[in-house]
Amino acid sequence: MRLTGIRVFRVELPLREGRYAWSGGKSVDVFDSTVVALDTDAGLTGWGEVCPLGPVYLPAYAAGARSGLGELGPQLLGLDPTDLGVLNHTMDRVLKGHAYVKSAIDMAAWDLLGRACGRPVASLLGGRHGEAVELYRAISQDRPEAMASRVAGYRAEGYRRFQLKVGGDPDTDIERIRAVRAVLTTGEVLVADANTGWLPHQALRVVRAVRDVDVYIEQPCATFEECLAVRRATDHPFVLDESIQDLGVLLRALELGAMDVVNLKISKLGGLTRTRLLRDVCVERGIAMTLEDSWGGDIVTAAIAHLAHSTPEALRFSATDFNSYGTREVARGAPRREGGVMRAGSAPGLGVEPLEDVLGPPVLHFRGGE
Ligand code: MG
């Protein structure tokens, strides 16, 4: 099989709730997602997607994804995209860094590999563990009582895990955590995700003030070292996310006991190939994971479902169904939340068929390699 064409599409993903807000006053109203089609001489097309959480969450931005694909695309034509090791090695050789740019290509190549051998990606990633994947619901940053008032609706949708967007004024964040925990019941899980928003002294005030509260603390500060200092000063279960950008940092974090749960995002790590590597290391070391991406639509949600469903249940802390947050369907066949869970599809590859009338004409199209 040879790669004979790469098409890149831009699609806007509006939000059901109108806006998604997190630490430091950051927010997004409409997500700008990039969809990639890998066309081959075998008549098969594989689909991938990358959608940064705006330009100020990670070192990634939507136009950068497309610009990077313009740099990478012409150099990949003619390769066999189902040779995932060669494909990733080539991407790293022709473009240093920019993991998120490579993620959409790698995701589409997994889709192609599944389509070519007639197996769902979850099977290729190790097989399906359990019946379904439990999901969490992020609660966009707002006033404490407004955040608490959202829980009932999300619970009615089936969610039992809630991730509270904090990382603002510490006094208000203490109120946010207390207000939301007060409306939760036994068995429901609360994570307070500061998204790097606190300075160490602020994080220390918050964890002391909520010491009696059953809550996980996620990525309180900007750097790994600051988070480690906070981790050592609290007995709350602790999650790292933004700091874990590659295998090297993960290994260091494991060595130092820097977290109890880690958040692995597909595009942050450069695609399903690299995320599987970190996932498998975490499985070996008994570190539970949230498996997700920075954002996305139906294609990213399908990729998360296959990755999460192929992860042992005990190590699966939660996952995200981004297509429940948005209003625009981009592909048929993507997993849909059923209560608070989703399942990887059983069709070959990622099991999605993008709606080309929704995608519109490609914004980039490279051909050749026959
Ligand atoms: Mg997080």
Image (tube, helix red, strand yellow):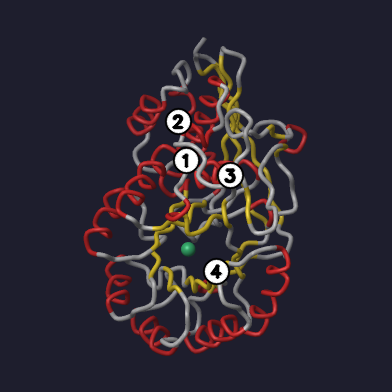
Can you tell which mark lies on residue 300?
3
Q: Nearer the viewer, mark 3 or mark 1?
A: 3
Q: Nearer the viewer, mark 2 or mark 4?
A: 4
Mark 4 surroundings: few (<14), some (14-19) or many (≥20) residues within 10 A = many
Q: Nearer the viewer, mark 3 or mark 2?
A: 3
Q: Amino acid at mark 3?
A: Val
Can you tell which mark lies on residue 233?
none
Q: Amino acid at mark 2?
A: Leu
Q: Nearer the viewer, mark 1 or mark 4?
A: 4
Q: Choose the circle earlier in sequence order: 2 or 1.
A: 2
Mark 3 vs ligand 1: CB below 8 Å = no
Residue nearest the viewer, comparing 210 with 80: 210
Dividing the picture into quarters, in which one does residue 116 lie? top right
Q: Residue 175: x, y in percent?
A: 55, 88
Q: Choose the circle earlier in sequence order: 3 or 1.
A: 1
* Disc 1 target residue: 101
| Mark 2, secondary structure of its residue | helix
Can you tell which mark lies on residue 72?
2
Q: Residue at x 49, y 74 (%)?
A: 192
